Image (tube, rainbow, N blue to C red):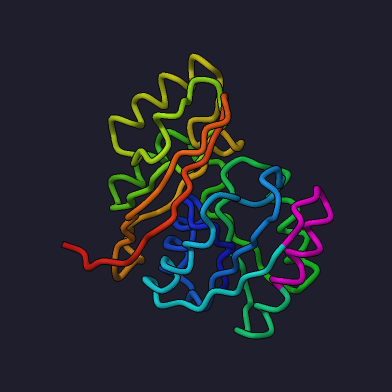
Amino acid sequence: MGALFSGGKDSTYSAWLTSKSDDLACLITMFPRSDSSYMFHYPDLEWTKLQAKSMGLPQLTDETAGVKEEELADLRRAVSRAKQAYQLDAVCTGALASVYQKSRVERICGDLGLRCLSPLWGVDPEAHLRRLVKEGFVAMLVGVSALGLDEKWLGRVIDERAIDELVSLGRKYRFNVGLEGGEGETFVLDCPLFKQKVVVEESKRDWRGDSGWLRISKAGLANKA
């Protein structure tokens, strides 16, 4: 099985869940050249190589211009390459609620003769976040783009207190607490799949008035305590 992998909480958690019943053969990561991609995570993707190394898994990467619908051909190419290189029979995704993303990945997988697994589909977003924390996932916000989420959220680790605040803000400003709609992007620093944790050594907030990214400029792996 291959995992569509962005380095964020949902794709990492999905990979972990499916690895319990299927052998995880590789990670498939798309690098969009535009931050307006409809399909793919954008910030700090270059550091997914550390996560892959920590998991001891090969990572197949490909680029896309990030143009709506056209980027699907790029994803198809990447999944096809992964299928041939690692003899895949299935691909897992971290989709929670995006019908747009899930339906398109399913179509690509169907065309390539692959099963498409989305173990997080339809989960309650608050319960999902609390489960992540309980099961040892350490995820940091590296992008925010929603009313109520300001610059101070960039670089913040999602813990129980942060979840409480997200729930309150989500109700007030009507955004998805699971951050599925692009309201927030995350980067996993540690989880049960990792043999070592990722340590961010240098970063800078890039704030644009109502949204922004955490630009990681230096990071490495360290032994877990």
* Residue at image location 72% in from the left, 58% down from the top: 106
Give the residue furthest to the left. Answer: 225
Percent position of residue 92, x then y: 58, 62
* Residue at image location 59% in from the left, 63% down from the top: 4
* Residue at image location 36% in from the left, 47% down from the top: 132
72 inside magenta stretch: yes
From the image, which quarter does the C terminus lie in? bottom left
Residue 82, placed above or below residue 209: below
On the rendered structure, is 9 left or right of 195? right
Residue 9 in view of the camera:
no
On the rendered structure, is 184 left or right of 71? left
Nearest the camera: 133 or 146? 146
Where is residue 112, by image quadrant? bottom right
Residue 183 in view of the camera:
yes
Where is residue 192, by image quadrant? bottom left
Residue 158, placed above or below residue 81: above
Percent position of residue 110, x then y: 76, 66
Residue 116, placed above or below residue 98: below
106 inside magenta stretch: no
On the rendered structure, is 14 left or right of 164? right
* Residue at image location 53% in from the left, 17% down from the top: 173
Magenta-colored span: 64-79
Where is residue 107, by image quadrant? bottom right
